[in-house]
Image (tube, helix red, strand yellow):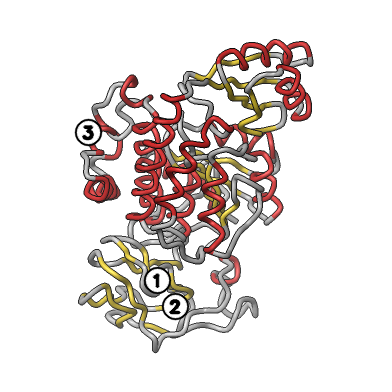
Amino acid sequence: MLAFTFPGQGSQRSGMGHAWVDHPSWEVAAEASDIAGRDLTALLLDAPMEELTRTANAQLATFVMSLVVLDAVERLGLFPAACAGHSLGEYTALVASGALSLSDGTRLVVERGNAMQAAADERPGTMAALIGIADGDAEAACQRAENEVWVANYNAPGQVVIAGTVEGIAIATERAKELGARKVLPIPVSGAFHTQLMLPARSRLRLTLDTVEFHSPEVPVVANVDARVHTDPGEWSGLLSAQLCSPVRWRQSLEALGGRGATTVVELGPGGVLTGMVRRTIPDVRGVAVAVPADLDKLIDAVAGTDDGSAAAPAHQGEHLYTSERVVVSPAPGVFEPDVNLAALESTALAEATAAPGSGQGAEPGSLVAVGDRVGTVGLTEVRTPFDGILVRWLAVRGERVVEGQPVAWIRTGGTS
């Protein structure tokens, strides 16, 4: 079972978009640029680290880069059973799940970055990672500092991030060393994120949150604030507001993904920090980072269970991971409408969908389709299958805006006669 995770601020790198400019998914950056009203491709290609480190730029660049990677993975026909995102990454997770549109997600990230930058300018702060310390001891170090300093991230066993004023961090890190922290790593930021010093940003962001429409997530999203799944779209505005001043419960979120049956947690976006946290937090679950196009092959090998690459079948656009599986892709961008006359296979388990003919395994088949049959429409354009087979399931939902080349239907081609 796949779970997708998305990184937050701090994962950005200068020139991180260059590897993607010739990939079809790079069009996501242009679309986000139109929404944001600024050239985000320049931010992803040419901005120096000094510019990228500014909160407003770092958040927007990381958000868009992660969506480019997400689009590339979806073009392979891979979709998650659950999502989560670290801090800013929670917005990416909500877009990935369908709870937020790209337009609303981009507008929120722009306002969030600007609001947090303004709050940091008004009340400067900083952050530090404590290594080799228990959660309770990190909390005690902050309390014993008797200053404005709090736990900001519960990242992994033995790794906690604290945030506060410069003076508060200095005192708390000394207390943490007394309580057994093996190492203290300063984090080069100008704000005390996920603490009470972000209250002005919370008030400002709330105004934009009230203008955004949230939808029921198509897949579960684990929230930072409480490490729980929230399916009611009405809850997400409050959760995102609370997130600015509350600690990110990332370790607990990863445990929640593992508890829901995730076998592979895929980090989509720049960096690879979250993948290391997977290995420390839920070691029985495979962690895979996808940051550049070359990582897509590694992901395919991991999903196919052949991490050494010895037996993995190549996956191409319009082709699933197995020789009897194919995906039908959208011929154009627009809103997808599936053909109401076609019934999909009820089971979504890959093992059942690819069961050998006559094995007695798997669910009752969905509709039989032949080459040229219409499976739906994208705007005014008909979507027709280039394959004979059985419709296993839809890979896009009714009313979803899809891009050219995005998989919309999953076809099993083996054993249909």
Mark earlier in primary sequence (1, 3): 3
Using residue 202 as the reference point, say whether residue 160 is left or right of it.
right
SS assignment at label 2:
strand
Q: Considering only vertical position in the picture, is 78 above or below 85?
A: below
Q: Can you give x and y, in whole percent of width and height, for residue 412 in the image?
A: 46, 73
How far is mark 1 from mark 2, CA to CA?
A: 7 Å
How far is mark 3 from mark 2, CA to CA?
A: 42 Å
Label 2 crowd bin: few (<14), some (14–19), many (20+), radius 10 Å: many
Q: Can you give x and y, in whole percent of width and height, for residue 43 in the image?
A: 27, 32
Label 3 crowd bin: few (<14), some (14–19), many (20+), radius 10 Å: some
SS assignment at label 3:
helix
Identify residue for label 2: 391
Front residue of 359/9: it is 9
Using residue 331 as the reference point, say whether residue 137 is left or right of it.
right
Q: Considering only vertical position in the picture, is 415 above or below 113?
A: below
Front residue of 194/379: it is 194
> Mark 3 or mark 2, which is nearer to you?
3
Q: Residue at x 29, y 39 (%)?
A: 20
Front residue of 366/110: it is 110
- The reply to whether dot 1 and dot 2 touch (C-beta < 8 Å) is yes
Q: Quadrant of the N terminus?
A: bottom right
How far is mark 1 from mark 3, CA to CA?
A: 35 Å
Mark earlier in primary sequence (1, 2): 2
Q: Considering only vertical position in the picture, is 370 above or below 30?
A: below
SS assignment at label 1:
strand
The disc placed on residue 42 is: 3
Q: Residue at x 44, y 63 (%)?
A: 323
Using residue 309 as the reference point, say whether residue 374 is left or right of it.
left
Q: Mark 2 belongs to which amino acid? A: Leu
